[in-house]
Image (tube, grey):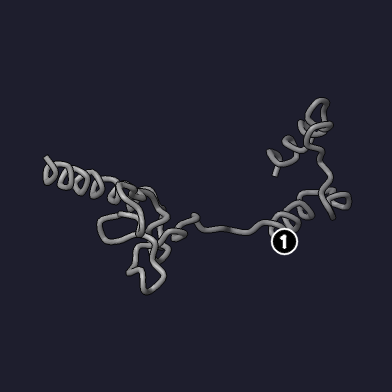
Amino acid sequence: MSRLKLSRKILEQTPLSTDWGVEVIGLDEVNDDKEWEKYICKRTTSSSHPCGTVNMAPESKGGCVNHRLQVYGTKNLRVVDASIFPTIPAGNLNAPTAMVAWRASKLIKEDYYKKV
């Protein structure tokens, strides 16, 4: 709680107050720690990591990338990040994304040596 109060005091100082401001709806009536706790619980939400925007699936099912991470309708373009996941993983995206990058490196090497 004290860090939030300190952050607010810092943001009220010039030049930060002129650039960002600290107007937050409903914050004027927050005075003590209990009210801060209620405010925080009411106003905060959790969010998931963004992924799945260029999902790997057959083109007929709305996919953008094939099983070799190649973008449909293009040549020599791959997507190697969390956006290829057709469903959102339950945990952190770091390990699955690292796995995709490792697999992509293998696929790129395979394709390169087939051409040479």
Write down the residue under mark 1: 42
Residue 14 as seen in the image, left or right of residue 4: right
Name the quadrant of the N terminus: top right
Left or right? Give the position of 12 relative to 81. right
- Seen from the viewer's position, the closer of residues 31 and 88 is 88
Q: Secondary structure at mark 1?
A: helix
Please tell me whether residue 84 is drawn above or below residue 101 in the rendered image.
below
Q: Quadrant of residue 10?
A: top right
Side of 113 where 60 appears, left or right: right
Residue at position x 28%, y 50% from top?
Answer: 99
Q: Quadrant of residue 20?
A: top right
Number of numbered tags placed on the structure image: 1
Q: Please tell me which residue is depicted at 77% across the width and 34% down the height of the picture.
A: 11
Q: Give the residue at the far top of this rendering.
A: 15
Q: Is residue 83 above or below residue 13?
A: below
- Circle 1: residue type: Lys
Residue projecting furthest to the bottom: 61
Query: How far from the left and from the top, in percent, is residue 76?
Result: 30, 47
Is 57 or 86 nearer to us in this picture?
A: 57
Residue 78: x, y in percent? 33, 49
**Residue at the far right in the pictured view:** 29
Q: Residue at x 22, y 45 (%)?
A: 108
Quadrant location of the C terminus in the rendered image: top left
Where residue 53 sits in the image (x, y, percent)? 47, 59
Q: Residue 112 at what x, y percent from top left?
A: 17, 42
Q: Residues within 10 Å of mark 1 (few under 14, many from 20)?
A: few
Look at 75% across and 40% down and name the residue there: 5
